[in-house]
Image: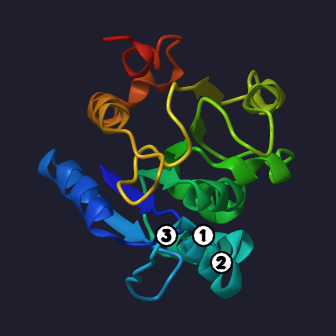
Amino acid sequence: MQILLTTDIFGETSHVGEIAARLQERGHSVKILSPYAEPRSFGDEDEAYAFFMRECGVETYAEKIRDTLREMVGPLICLGFSAGAAALWKALACPEAGCAEMAILFYGGQIRAATELQPLCETLLVFPAEEPHFSVADLIDRLQGRPDIFCTKVPWLHGYMNRLSGNFDQEGSQKTLAWLDELLDQPSRVTEKDVFRQLLRRG
């Protein structure tokens, strides 16, 4: 399966490379898309955020994704993290997204500013336990139940999959990667009621 992986504000890092390598070992073809033209190094999240907003922003990132989707031939699965998730949400609502069969978007908080959009593929939204600037529960209520939209809230915080984030959670990251392995091996499970069961199972 082809996978398009859109990164968060840190861009293409060694940790993102490790996730891509894990997916490739399972037979998937992975294309990493960063908001930046080349890898960047940041001292902390505040520096990364300031640079992202100054040099790119979610809308510009979404346009970059749309340009990439125009060049790709399906079937395609999209994975997005944080800013990459929000940008994918915008891009997947456009005709260029016709090659995408499924999207899995992690802690895309800026989706709240574009809830009127409807991705053209089945979309799983994985939200963190809480966000400092809005109610996760309220956002899920606005999205859950719409056609091909499936939401869940995990017990970890925004950025838990990224080692460079202050909210990185080793257990949460490992559990999520194991869940992804299983789901990407059987993408038809996306519509099952218990699609998040393994991810949310305790212990």
Label 3, on which residue? 44
- The residue beneath circle 2 is 50
Callout in the foreground (2, 3): 3
- Return the x and y of residue 1 as percentages of the image width and height: 29, 49
Query: In percent of the image, x 84 and y 53: which residue is there?
Result: 113
Name the residue type under label 2: Ala
User: In the picture provided, is 4 more to the left or to the right than 48?
Assistant: left
Whether residue 157 is situated above or below residue 189 in the rendered picture: below
- Asked if the residue at tag 1 contacts the one at tag 2, i.e. Cβ–Cβ closer than 8 Å, the answer is yes
SS label for mark 3:
loop
Q: Secondary structure at mark 2?
A: helix
Q: Please name the amino acid that badge 3 sits on.
A: Asp
Dot placed on the residue nearer the N-terminal end, 2 or 3: 3
- Residue 46 lies, in percent from the top left, at 60, 69
Label 1 residue SS? helix
Residue in front for this viewpoint, 143 or 137: 137
CA separation in Å, label 2 and label 1:
6 Å
